[in-house]
Amino acid sequence: MVSLTHLQRLESESIHIMREVIAESERPVMLYSVGKDSAVMLHLARKAFYPSAPPFPLLHVDTTWKFRAMYEMRDRMARESGMELIVHRNPEALARGINPFEHGSLHTDLWKTEGLKQALGRFGFDAAFGGARRDEEKSRAKERIFSFRSANQRWDPKSQRPELWHLYNTRKAKGESIRVFPLSNWTELDIWQYIHLESIPIVPLYFAASRPTVQRDGLLLMVDDERFVLHPGEVPTMRSIRFRTLGCYPLTGAIESSAATLPQIIREMLLTTTSERQGRAIDHDQTSSMEQKKQEGYF
Amino acid sequence: MASAPEPTYAAPALAADDIEAYLAQHQRKSLLRFITCGSVDDGKSTLIGRLLYDSRMIFDDQLAALKADSKRIGTQGEQLDFALLVDGLAAEREQGITIDVAYRFFATDRRKFIVADTPGHEQYTRNMVTGASTADLAVILIDARKGVLTQTRRHSYLAHLLGIRHLVLAVNKMDLAGYDRNVYEAILADYRRFADGIGITQFVPIPVSGLAGDNITALSAATPWYRGPSLMEHLETVELDIDGAQRGPFRMPVQWVNRPNADFRGVCGLISGGRIRPNDAVRVAPSGRLSKVARIVAQGGDLEEAVAGQSVTITFADDIDCSRGDVLSIADAPPEVADQFEAAIVWMADEELLPGRPYWLKLATQTVTATVHSPKYQINVNTMEHLAAKTLGLNAIGVVNLSTDKPLVFEPYATSRDLGGFILIDKLSHATVAAGLLHFALRRSQNVHWQALDIDRDAHARLKHQRPRLLWFTGLSGAGKSSIANLVQKKLYALGKHSFLLDGDNVRHGLNKDLGFTDADRVENIRRIGEVSRLMTDAGLIVLTAFISPFRAERRMVRDMSPPGEFIEIYVETPLAVAEARDVKGLYKKARAGELKHFTGIDSPYEPPEHAEIRVNTEEISAEAAADLIVAYVLRDMHESASSADGCGAGV
């Protein structure tokens, strides 16, 4: 008997989910955020549909404030996978010059939450893959793999469908859409192990290197380009840092680290004692903030 | 069974010393899915929190938050309240209960675990069934101070119903029962009696304390009379369902056909049973066609073998027809095919089951239309008694017969969860309304064959110089359906057309005199009328029906039973106030007085058509004018379809 490993089981489940969506939806899309979870999700999609290219486009909801290395990786992966890349930037946020330095939570609302809604509506996507995992945050532990959104993209925790066996009910009314999370049952450790095992390319920022940084509000921020507004007295300092999650560079906290290989990253992760989302400014307002964001349509 | 208590969490130490060795070990871990069942007071969340805590899945920032939360809203005084680690949504936290299925993850050196945390309240049968559907094992919690309760029996029954082979009876809160062996043994004996009665042949009892940690990861000195295993040790070693499935015959429901170009055609799916290699002879169900596996294609290079639990892409040695919904199997042991079944149904929607109403049925990758007949009985999940039932409400479990419009490839649920488990989907709301478990096929479906008739429906209609039509009048009581239908029939007669009018008088008093006016009976009423109309249109007639037929789903059912274009829905539109003011038969008065129950418009809903072919408003036009309009429509419609059927435009 061949006993499948947990990673083989997770891989098979994710592939099964993706194929089910492709078989039963009209206009699917993959939300591609360029992070490590997106990297794994894209890798799984390429496996699921091999030798075809995945039969859907990649959608990047851009804020113009991502790390430069993320844009490079995004364009490279789109090229290599042979998939169409759709980049959407909320025109209103662009016109108003919304940025994380001056606009606080409005930055996330307009660029990400509104931007995503606009993109899904404009292209008429009826199913969107996302890389969220249930282990990321307590309220996500209860999210379904297939999450239904009303015509105005809202998530209602009370009206989600039960998911039994490997059976997913993908039927929906006109205007309604589904967010599908093929990585629901993966943990952060699973993701790293799989990246290691499958040699999946990820943004170099995950590996430690000497980078220009400033300390601000308890976060260690990287000065990624000249738009970074330095406060009086702040001087960028070179530190050996890496990132556990990637988002808009002015909002994403780095950790000091010397882990420059995947095994070293995994080692550090196993021995470290803070959870992954702590590096994101978005969660810190109040305990249930992620859940509120989700109800409003944030991914 | 007894073994020395070994700490199973060498992970951090090994990771620190030799990360490569750690990775090599941890990439070989297997995956166990289990559920925990118990009510709020049994300490279920505490137990899960303890498993997460003991397996080092809690980070410092989470621990700090836990300490703060324990003080603020915890129930354990100064102690850590592990339950707070797993209670998720904000509203639920405030109410102090979990109300849905939540999935948690932890890992030891040997296995990764996915825990479905399901609540124990009576109204949440649906959640437990959902969590149990993917579980290899169930942990049934019992409070040592309370013993076997109604909910213990309910959880055990549901776990058993869903086919979970491994049951753990965790007798919890042993610390509060003085670690008393007699208490434990008495509960065991009590549970064994119950389990025997419902056919549970095996279970593993373990005395534990989630709060104090006894017998969770290691055997406890407080229970020297218990020889093991600890809960974790058992979870780490119990056989996985997916490994057992490998011993069965090869099965793969086809999900998708991969066809990038004319040279490649592969079928994709998740193998649900057995194993497969290139050159194996396979059969496609339901067609029964045979072929041979050419390749098992994967991105990193073809596979030499694939087993249950793997998602694969298979190519064939020849150009065999095979698509989504088919089931690929080993050639000499194909699954069954049938269209009538006995099944257990767990109802999951607020709106109750309507026997006779068509629902979508999804089983593996097949989606068909299914009709559920009246339940044979309902099962009381607390007492396991069989009760008579006409329908099933939220969280009810019943045994029913059902039929499908197309043959299903299946296996009994007891043989295969993937080919025996199904969901029912409401055709209008798209909600998942039920989970079902196929017991067996009803043989009669295979013995009744359609008699091919020499004189077909077209021949009958030709003789009458007309096309069969079903004019379906719908509207409130007193809207004028019968009056208008009568006029239409007279006009058709005058034109030499053969028609027949079905209304309450000639149907309710005969064919359907056994039916009342509950929602379920209304559905059956319409189904029978639909079938009779079908026979009459087969005879070439223009059939007129005048029934309130309040539900969209049933009108759509009749429409779907008819050949395309034959069903003409006529909405006789009248505001309720107007119909009630007319009250020709005095029915509204009775309904308002409470003498008539389930009266449409008063205490039973009317769902107006959304896309009726004809809509007449009796406030705006007379019955005579309405009838003229309908006759004109029908004549034109018959004429057009006759022209197109003849394949020439003559006379248009």
Image (cartoon, coloured by chain):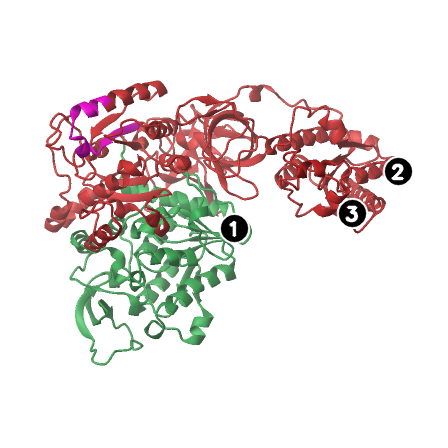
Chain colours: A green, B red
What number is the disc on residue B599? none
Gap between marks 2 and 1 measured at Cα: 48 Å
Q: Is residue B176 magenta?
A: yes
Front-most of B484 and B228? B484
Discs 1 and 3 lie in a common subunit:
no
Could you tell me if residue A299 is visible in this image? no
Give the magenta-colored segment's residue range: B166-186
**Residue at (72% x, 36% y) in the render:** B587
Could you tell whether B9 is left or right of A18 in the image?
left
Front-most of B391 and B438? B391
Q: Which residue is mark 3?
A: B618
Q: Is residue A31 magenta?
A: no
> Which circle's residue, 3 or 2, is located before the other in the chain?
2
Dividing the picture into quarters, in which one does residue B247 lie?
Answer: top left
Dividing the picture into quarters, in which one does residue B560 lie?
Answer: top right
What number is the disc on residue B495? 2
Q: On screen, A155 above or below B463? A: below
The location of residue A236, given as percent across then percent down, is 20, 76
Graded by Cα atoms within 10 Å as few (under 14), some (14 to 19) or many (20 or more), the crowding at tag 1 reads few
Q: Which residue is mark 1?
A: A26
Picture quarter with the N terminus of chain A: top left
Determine the residue located farthest toward the right in the rendered image: B494
Gap between marks 3 and 2 measured at Cα: 24 Å
Whether label 2 touches label 1, CB < 8 Å: no
Gap between marks 1 and 3 measured at Cα: 42 Å
Disc 1 on helix, strand or loop?
loop
